[in-house]
Structures are given as structure tokens and as C-alpha cells.
Amino acid sequence: MKFILPAALTFFAVSQANALELTQSLALNTDVTFEHKIDANTTQVDFAPELSWTPMSGLELLAGTSLDVYDRANGFTMADEFDTLPTVTFGAEYQVPAVDNMELAIGTAYNFDTKERDDVTIKATFSF
């Protein structure tokens, strides 16, 4: 049993459900992440819904959050997530039309519980 759980969690290390197309340009993307750290002997399951809106070709606007569902030390923790207000991430990604392997992105997060905004990050990614 000690080998089956880590093997299963490794196999499902990052599991992404298919996007739910709400409209032609609006989608709900949901990631469920199963993580087991062998050395630390910890297990964690996270649930991350994200709303994606594509108003024009190449531009995607995103808003999402991450919810802890389970961790080995505390057991099922999803109910604890509703004791505080969430931190929501906001961002935009733009695929440069003339350069297929270049993407521009900007993002931040807002913690509704502490009423504080994280740093705004601007990023350019060139893939080759």
C-alpha cells in the first residue's frame, strides 16, 4: 500500500479536466492537482477553477483561484476554505501575431480577506 499511493499520485501529478465552453469566447478551466512529496511524506490535493474570456484572437483574459481540498496533516480541508475570503488571480495573455513563439502576459492577485493586491507582473516569453 505504501508504494501504490505514491505511484498513483505521481501518475496523477497534474490532472486537468477539459475546459467547459460556456460560450464561444468564455470557458471554465479547472485543474485538480494531486501532489505527494516522497521525502517529506506529505500529500496534498488542490482544486483551481479559472474563468477564461477570449474577446479577440490571441488575447485571453483570466480570473481564478486555488482551493486546498486535502492535506495529509489536516485531512479534508475544503470546508476551511470558506472561513476566509479567497485570493483571486487576474491576468491577460497575448500571443504576438507576427511572432508565433512569443507571448506577452500581465497578472496580479487580490486577497479579498486582507484587501491587498499582490505585485503586478509583466512577462514576455520567447519559446524556441
Image (spheres, rainbow, N blue to C red):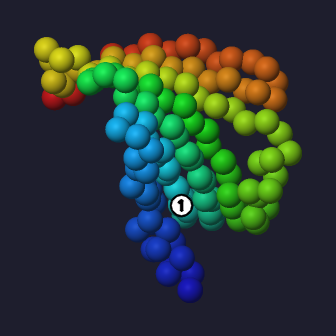
Residue 127 image position (x, y, % from top left): 21, 27
Residue 35 image position (x, y, % from top left): 54, 59
Q: Quadrant of residue 64?
A: top right
Which residue is painted at 80% across and 56% down in the image? 79
Residue 125 visible in the snapshot: no
Farthest residue, direction right:
83
In the image, 5 versus 97, the foreground residue is 97
In the image, 128 versus 52, the foreground residue is 52
Residue 24 visible in the snapshot: yes
Dot 1 falls on a residue whose secondary structure is: strand
Which residue is painted at 41% across and 68% down in the image? 11
Which residue is painted at 79% across and 61% down in the image? 74
Q: Quadrant of residue 41?
A: bottom right
In the image, 60 versus 15, the foreground residue is 60
Residue 80 image position (x, y, % from top left): 82, 52
Farthest residue, direction bottom:
1
Q: Is residue 100 above or below residue 29?
A: above
- Residue at the disc numbered 1: 34
Residue type, numbered disc 1: Phe
